[in-house]
Image (spheres, helix red, strand yellow):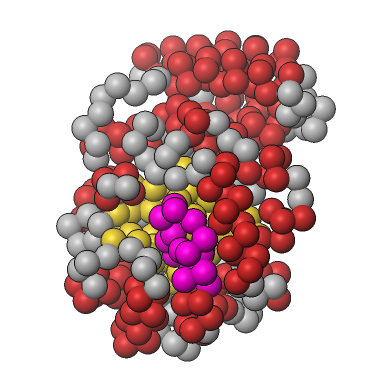
């Protein structure tokens, strides 16, 4: 897999980056690398595998992020994920939630480098897919280059060639996952230093990156940039990324995106998918634009309930067309 494929990626986000969101994002961006939300090994092994793992070829390239630390479970999941056709398997070493810690995966594993190395080695020997890791730069009172670089060295020796670094440490006690996204201070220079010390592996930076100017700056220091909330909250930010980072001007308008989505919703509803499972991801499509409030209101009033009617999805095109007219006037 070429480095360009991961130059810009969408962060795995719980309850956000499911297959419907990835379809929606792919309508806007042909070049971004997409990730699933984190899926625990137990969910895959004990649940409905097709429901949990199925996705469309249109979403590719797409990686699946696993949560777990049981070697045999990780190994079995890697084989299953490969059979479903994903392009990469990523191990979550960064989620700080209490539930995740209780099950011994996520950010708490930063404290156990040997176990992490065992997990990644087992995964690599269980699949032909690239295995990558996503972690943070430290935990609790530990935030120093020596510890992090030693951790990276352990990972590197397993054969992992790509590491995604969230440029914040994880506070494992006393903060919620949301607070862990804003209270620990960003430390981009530490990520840059890790790249300097490990030039032979791909280092991708993550954490509060919100505009193309900053993306370009980071790309002078590291191999790739991963973005989460800025894209989820304002999906058409991807259009700027396509133009300014990938030099691609063949981008669908918001109206064209909604037209494609209406067709997608129609097909999915016939399979038993609820309207709100898809349309909830589109709330930010008009973020910062004239008519954004009308768009959000229509979604809220007509498409966020479990029993939302597909016929109301068809009427959303009228809202879109009015928004496009407002944009032209202004």
Task: Identify the image quadrant of residue 83.
Answer: top right
Q: Residue at x 45, y 36 (%)?
A: 60
Give the quarter of the figure containing the C terminus: top left
x and y, in percent, of residue 257 in the image? 48, 21
Asked if 282 appears above or below 231 in the picture, the reply is above
Q: Position of residue 309 (x, y in %)?
A: 77, 19
Foreground residue, 149 or 46?
A: 46
Q: Is residue 217 above or below residue 301?
A: below
Residue 72 belongs to magenta span: no
Left/right of residue 225 with respect to residue 93 in the rendered view? left
Q: Which residues are magenta?
A: 119-134
Total marks in image? 0
Question: Which residue is most to the right?
Answer: 307
Q: Nearer the viewer, residue 21 or 270?
A: 270
Picture coordinates of residue 153, whole percent (x, y): 33, 79
Residue 277: quarter of image: top right
Where residue 4 sits, quadrant-wise, is top left
Residue at coordinates 63% horizontally, 30% vertically from top-left? 279
Q: Residue at x 29, y 21 (%)?
A: 250
Using the image as rendered, state which of residue 132 and residue 235 is in the foreground.
132
Q: Is residue 323 visible?
A: no
The question of residue 133 being in magenta is answered with: yes
Residue 274 in view: yes
Residue at the image point whose x is 35% and y is 61% from the top: 162
Percent of width and height locating residue 198: 24, 72
């Amino acid at each position: 897999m070429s480095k360009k494929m991961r130059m810009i990626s969408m962060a795995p986000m719980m309850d956000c980056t499911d297959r419907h969101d990835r379809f929606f994002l792919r309508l806007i961006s042909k070049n971004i690398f997409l990730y699933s939300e984190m899926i625990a090994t137990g969910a895959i092994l004990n649940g409905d595998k097709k429901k949990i793992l199925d996705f469309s070829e249109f979403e590719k390239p797409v990686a699946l992020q696993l949560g777990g630390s049981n070697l045999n479970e990780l190994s079995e999941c890697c084989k299953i994920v490969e059979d479903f056709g994903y392009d990469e398997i990523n191990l979550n070493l960064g989620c700080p939630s209490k539930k995740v810690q209780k099950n011994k995966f996520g950010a708490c594993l930063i404290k156990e480098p040997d176990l992490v190395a065992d997990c990644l080695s087992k995964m690599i020997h269980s699949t032909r897919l690239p295995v990558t890791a996503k972690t943070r730069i430290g935990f609790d009172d530990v935030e120093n280059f020596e510890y992090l670089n030693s951790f990276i060295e352990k990972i590197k020796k397993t054969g992992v060639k790509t590491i995604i670094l969230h440029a914040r440490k994880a506070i494992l006690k006393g903060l919620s996952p949301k607070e862990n996204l804003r209270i620990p201070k960003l430390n981009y220079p530490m990520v840059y230093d890790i790249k300097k010390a490990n030039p032979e592996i791909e280092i991708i930076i993550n954490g509060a990156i919100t505009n193309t100017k900053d993306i370009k700056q980071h790309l002078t220091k590291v191999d790739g940039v991963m973005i989460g909330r800025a894209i989820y909250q304002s999906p058409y930010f991807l259009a700027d990324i396509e133009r300014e980072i990938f030099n691609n001007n063949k981008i669908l308008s918001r109206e064209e995106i909604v037209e494609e989505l209406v067709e997608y919703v129609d097909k999915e509803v016939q399979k038993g998918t609820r309207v709100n499972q898809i349309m909830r991801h589109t709330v930010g499509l008009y973020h910062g634009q004239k008519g954004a409030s009308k768009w959000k209101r229509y979604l809220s009033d007509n498409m966020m309930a479990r029993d939302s009617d597909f016929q109301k999805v068809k009427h959303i095109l009228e809202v879109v067309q009015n928004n496009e007219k407002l944009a032209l006037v202004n």
